[in-house]
Every structure is written in structure tokens, then in C-alpha cells.
Image (spheres, coloured by chain):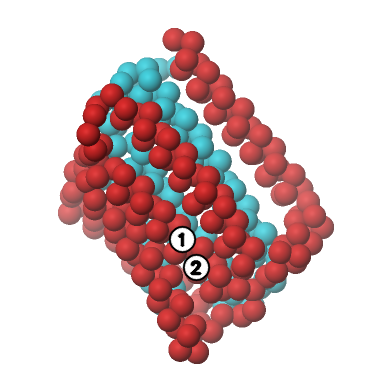
Chain colours: A red, B cyan
Amino acid sequence: MTLQVLAFALAALLMLGGAAVVALTKDLMRLVVGLGVFLLGVAGLFLYYGHAFLATAQVFVYVGGVLVLVVFAVMVVHRASGGRPIVASRHDIGAAAVAFGVSGMLVMSLRGSVGGWLPAPGASGASIAEELLGGHLVAFESLGVLLLVALVAVLVIIGSGERR
Amino acid sequence: MTVLVLCAVVFGIGMYTVLTRREIVAILAGVELMLGSANVLFIALASFSGADAGVAGAIGLVILVIAAAEAAVGLSLVVTISRRSKRSSIDELTEVNG
């Protein structure tokens, strides 16, 4: 029990710390590192809830893929500026009120749906594959089509930018 | 309850990032915070409600892939906008032409 609470606390700390860095830092590269820490925290919580396959996919797809993509985007966008790229922001009490008001509404509306500390046993990779290739085959194939469309869209967007 | 508060707070931080940042890459990072916290909350709620773990994992994977596709398209837009106009702040992007 204690070990589980510690694991949860560590993952939660990674999530909160990473998110705080993303929201507050002025340095764009620190923001990217904060996003990476947040994504590792998310993977930790997936692991805590017994979804080891989902945690592995999260680390591979996000920390290994999307984060590298973000770093490339930062390098391309800010290559001419020189020095460390700075993130402009307009901190506003109204924006904070709206954002955390939505948080409060989420907590109020879902507070009856969550239990204590100990989660139910999670899903193995085999059971997820069974669902995806069995009853949810259409969703799985649609996902493949979506990824293909996203890939083609990226090529079209980047290609149209190069022609001009 | 703890996971609900955690995810709600992180979702709020993501929304605050989207509302206050002026850099497009930072706004995309805020969207990723919101999507990540929603996915964790979905998995946690499925765990507490006793839903089929395989179905929950499959849907979680679908959300993860959709978020990754969204990030790829968003970042390609950022790179294209930067190449065309040499700008990366949303305050400078006031034209929505095709």
C-alpha cells in the first residue's frame, strides 16, 4: 500500500511539476523539457493503473516521437533569432479564473465516480490487442486511416510552404 | 478523489497555458497537457468503475494516437507559418487566408 502511494505521489509530482514548468517558464527549451517530464508522469500513472502497454506506448510515441518533433519545430522556428528562444506570455487573473473554474467544475461533476487509492487490475497488451482486433476493429482501422491522413496533411502543409 | 483533483488541476494549468501564452509551440504544449490529463482521468475512471480493462486500454490508445496526430499536424503548421511569415507569435498572425 505504502509503495503504491509513493509510486502515485512520484508520478503526480512529475505531472504537476512538468505542467507548472510548461505554464510558467520563459525559456522555450525548458518548456519542452517540462513537457517531457509531464509526459513521463502520465506514463507513470498509466503504469500505476496497471496499463503497462499504454505506458510503453506513451513513452515511445510521445517522449520518443512527439517531443523530438517539438524540438525540431523549435529549432526551425527560432534558428535565425540566435540565443535561447524566449516564450512571450500575457499572465492574466481572468484567464486563471476561467481555467481553474473549469477545473473546479470537473471535480464537482465527477467526484462521485472515483474511489480510493487501490486501482483494479489493468489491461495487458494481449487483452488490448484482443479488443482492437476483435470487437473494435473498425475503430482500429479508422485510427490507421486517421494517421495516414495526418501524415499526408503534414506533407501537403510543409510542401505548400516550400513552393512559395 | 486524488487523481480527479490532480487531473483537473493539470487540465486547468493546460487551459491557462493556452489562454496566456503567445508562442504557438507553447500553446500546443498546453493542448498536450489538457489531452494527457484527460487520458489519465479516463483510465482512472475506467479502473474505479470496474469497466473492462481491455476496452479502457484500447480507447486510451486511440486517444493517445489522436493526440500524437494532432501534435504532428499542429507542429507542421507552426513550421509552415514560420517559413512564410518569419513569425511565431499568435499576436502577429491576424490573417486567416487560404
Do the residues at pointers 1 and 2 share their chain? yes
Q: In this view, does B87 lie above or below A160?
A: below
The local crowd at label 1, few if under 14, some if 14 to 19, many if 20 or more residues have their Cα within 10 Å, is: many
| Residue at 29 percent of width and 37 percent of height | B23
| Residue at 64 percent of width and 63 percent of height | A53
| Residue A11 locus on image (x, y percent) | 43, 70
| Residue at 76 percent of width and 48 percent of height | A138
Q: Mark 1 points at which residue?
A: A40
| Residue B70 locus on image (x, y percent) | 51, 41
| Residue at 32 percent of width and 27 percent of height | A79
Q: Is residue B79 left or right of residue B39?
A: left
Name the residue at the front extreme. A83
Q: Is residue A92 left or right of residue B83?
A: left
Q: Is mark 1 on a helix, strand or loop?
A: helix
Based on the displayed image, in which of its 4 quarters is residue B6 positioned?
bottom left
Q: Nearer the viewer, residue A87 or A110?
A: A87
Q: Tell me, yes or no, whether the two marked residues, 1 and 2, touch with CB atoms within 8 Å.
A: yes
Q: Which of B36 and A64 is in front in this view?
A: A64
Query: Given the image, what chain letter belongs to the residue carrying mark 2?
Result: A
Based on the displayed image, in which of its 4 quarters is residue A20 positioned?
bottom left
Residue A44, numbered label: 2
Q: Quote the CA–CA distance across marks 1 and 2.
A: 6 Å
Amino acid type indicated by mark 1 = Leu
Name the residue at the right extreme. A134
Based on the displayed image, in which of its 4 quarters is residue B86 positioned?
top left
Q: Can residue B69 be seen at all in this image of the molecule?
A: yes
| Residue B10 locus on image (x, y percent) | 37, 61
